[in-house]
Image (spheres, rainbow, N blue to C red):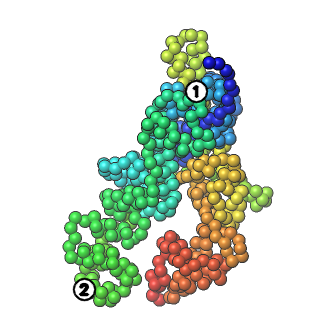
């Protein structure tokens, strides 16, 4: 038997703890970030508010070199700056290097801070609970899966103050599954296992696939993504809560749910339900003669049913006043400078506390080197200091990443910031990812729930992303532009003789947009514009 020595090159995927913290911070909006920073200031004595700017503090202090292995931190820093999920290493690399499995196995033991693991605390906007809080409490009492609870929270946070859900089903499902992915990372980090031998881990895995692979290796059960039908099931469950009808997409659906929620219906209630379910079209167009003829009911009986319907609440969320309103703080303000023919992008998160390392505790940490404290105290001080430096670096990187994304959006949507909504161009996440060198998932986290203040109003960053259609000139235009043009034509129509969908189709073609009649009807319904008959006004 011979003994030999061989060199072998292998690829491994590594995830620094800073990356996990950075991803969480990146997805927070200004209010959530403010709450998170205040929470950290309370929990970590190594942090304190500073009178200086965060950027100056990062320059003045050696924040990029906390007191652990320099090579380890440099690789972590590069990972943050390039926004890569993977990097290559050879066998025999630095044994102190943090990797995906290192974080999953003992993140809490290495860094000793529970504040980064617990990001479920809510941001207090008002003392009294909102209607969303009330509905979430009701939903939590149901016997449902954790996936459904995450879906319910996501759906309710997308419900408008009126109680209706206008979010597109695809976007809603993606948001729910993104939150499930984040929850799976937390689950896996709480189930440590043996180190994964070199060579066993498949190469070129995405973040989600890697987490699933490690979970299978360790026998950990993760949460599953939800499909469209499961998301709809959660939505229908929410509609049955009190008040009924929350989360409905249409007025008809909202009214039907409210009637079905009653324990017992009298004769007028039963007729009202029949009107909403089977005669909605004729009833909504006030074709009462046709309704009475088909249902064989008297005018008096029909009037009782109509009165029953009028007692229902067309806006089930309105009964809670403004308590359910969510405060919105823009992340950026974009102003066009005509003189310089350039854009001024300003950060509007000046209310965020500016933090630095507490000098007293930093001095105590230095004293610990001279063995004035026991080993446990030294480890505690080091862990708190490393946590503080991690947070400051992540905040700085978050600001830089958001700057890259907003710069790319402004560059791609120059016409919008000059002309307004008429200048909006088609834009997808991949375009901004290519401009910035960031991952698509990072772009999604950046634009989620964040707003930009412009000269034309306040817009969510997602507003600037839309699909494209080709006009009669062969130019690709945003679907939002098409909807705005359709609304403009309807606004200018004669109210004595409103345009039918077919005539709207012809008018859109004359305006340079060749779209089908069913597309016109689809866009009209999405904008909550009724059919021509219901737009008619009596002179």
Seen from the viewer's position, the closer of residues 524 and 197 is: 197
* Rendering quarter of residue 456: bottom right
Q: Residue at x 25, y 74 (%)?
A: 269
Determine contact: label 1, label 2, CB under 8 Å: no
Q: Secondary structure at mark 1?
A: helix
Seen from the viewer's position, the closer of residues 367 and 20 is: 20
N-terminal label among 1 and 2: 2
Disc 1 marks which residue?
A: 386
Q: Within 10 Å of the Cα at label 1, are there few (<14), some (14-19), or many (20+) other Cα atoms?
A: many
- Residue 297 is tagged as 2
* Rendering quarter of residue 468: bottom right
Seen from the viewer's position, the closer of residues 426 and 159 is: 426
Q: Residue at x 67, y 29 (%)?
A: 8
Image coordinates of residue 348 in percent, x first then y, are 62, 48
Seen from the viewer's position, the closer of residues 399 and 207 is: 207
- Residue 155 as seen in the image, left or right of residue 344: left
* Rendering quarter of residue 66: top right
> With respect to residue 324, does 467 lie above or below?
below
Q: Residue at x 38, y 66 (%)?
A: 315
- Residue 369 as seen in the image, left or right of residue 437: left
> With respect to residue 214, does 109 lie above or below?
above
Residue extending farthest to the front is: 1
- Residue 462 as seen in the image, left or right of residue 168: right
Image coordinates of residue 375 in percent, x first then y, are 52, 14
Q: Quadrant of the N terminus?
A: top right
Image coordinates of residue 476 in percent, x first then y, are 68, 69
On the question of residue 496 being in view, the answer is: yes
From mark 1 to mark 2, how far is it between C-alphas?
77 Å
Q: Secondary structure at mark 2?
A: loop
- Residue 100 is tagged as none
């Amino acid at each position: 038997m011979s003994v030999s020595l061989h060199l072998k090159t292998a690829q491994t995927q590594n995830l620094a703890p800073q990356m996990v913290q950075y991803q969480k911070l990146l997805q927070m909006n200004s209010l959530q970030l403010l709450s998170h920073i205040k929470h950290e200031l309370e929990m970590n004595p190594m942090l304190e508010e500073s009178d200086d700017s965060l950027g100056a503090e990062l320059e003045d202090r050696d924040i990029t070199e906390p007191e652990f292995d320099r090579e380890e931190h440099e690789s972590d820093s590069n990972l943050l700056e390039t926004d890569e999920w993977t990097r290559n290493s050879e066998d025999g690399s630095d044994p102190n290097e943090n990797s995906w499995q290192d974080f999953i196995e003992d993140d809490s033991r290495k860094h000793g801070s529970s504040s980064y693991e617990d990001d479920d605390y809510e941001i207090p906007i008002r003392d009294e609970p909102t209607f969303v809080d009330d509905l979430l409490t009701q939903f939590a009492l149901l016997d449902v899966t954790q996936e459904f609870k995450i879906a319910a929270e996501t759906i309710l946070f997308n419900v408008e103050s009126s109680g209706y859900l206008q979010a597109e089903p695809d976007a809603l499902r993606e948001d729910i599954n993104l939150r499930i992915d984040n929850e799976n990372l937390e689950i896996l980090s709480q189930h440590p296992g043996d180190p994964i031998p070199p060579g066993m881990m498949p190469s070129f895995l995405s973040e989600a696939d890697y987490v699933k692979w490690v979970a299978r290796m360790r026998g950990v059960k993760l949460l599953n993504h939800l499909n469209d039908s499961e998301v709809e099931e959660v939505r229908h469950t929410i509609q049955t809560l009190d008040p009924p009808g929350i989360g409905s997409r249409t007025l008809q659906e909202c009214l039907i749910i409210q009637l079905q929620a009653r324990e017992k219906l009298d004769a007028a209630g039963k007729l009202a339900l029949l009107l909403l379910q089977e005669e909605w079209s004729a009833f909504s167009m006030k074709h009462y003669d046709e309704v009475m003829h088909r249902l064989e009911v008297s005018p008096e009986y029909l009037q009782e049913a109509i009165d029953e319907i009028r007692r229902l609440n067309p806006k089930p969320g309105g009964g809670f006043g403004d308590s359910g309103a969510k405060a919105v703080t823009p992340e950026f303000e974009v102003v066009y400078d005509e003189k310089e023919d350039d854009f001024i992008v300003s950060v509007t998160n000046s209310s965020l506390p500016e933090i630095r390392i507490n000098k007293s505790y930093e001095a105590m940490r230095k004293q610990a080197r001279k063995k004035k404290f026991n080993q446990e105290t030294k480890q505690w001080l080091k862990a708190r200091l490393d946590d503080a430096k991690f947070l400051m670096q992540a905040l700085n990187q978050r600001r830089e990443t958001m700057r890259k994304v907003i710069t790319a959006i402004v560059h791609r949507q120059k016409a919008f910031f000059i002309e307004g909504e008429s200048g909006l161009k088609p834009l997808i996440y991949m375009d901004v990812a290519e401009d910035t060198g960031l991952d698509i998932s990072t772009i999604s986290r950046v634009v989620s729930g964040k707003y930009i203040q412009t000269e034309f109003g306040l817009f969510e960053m997602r507003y600037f992303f839309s699909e494209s259609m080709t006009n009669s000139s062969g130019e690709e235009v945003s679907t939002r532009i098409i909807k705005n043009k359709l609304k403009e034509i309807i606004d200018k129509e004669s109210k004595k003789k409103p345009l039918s969908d077919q005539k709207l189709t012809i008018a859109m073609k004359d305006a340079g947009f060749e779209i089908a009649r069913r597309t016109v009807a689809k866009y009209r319904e999405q904008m909550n514009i009724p059919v021509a008959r219901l737009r008619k006004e009596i002179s």
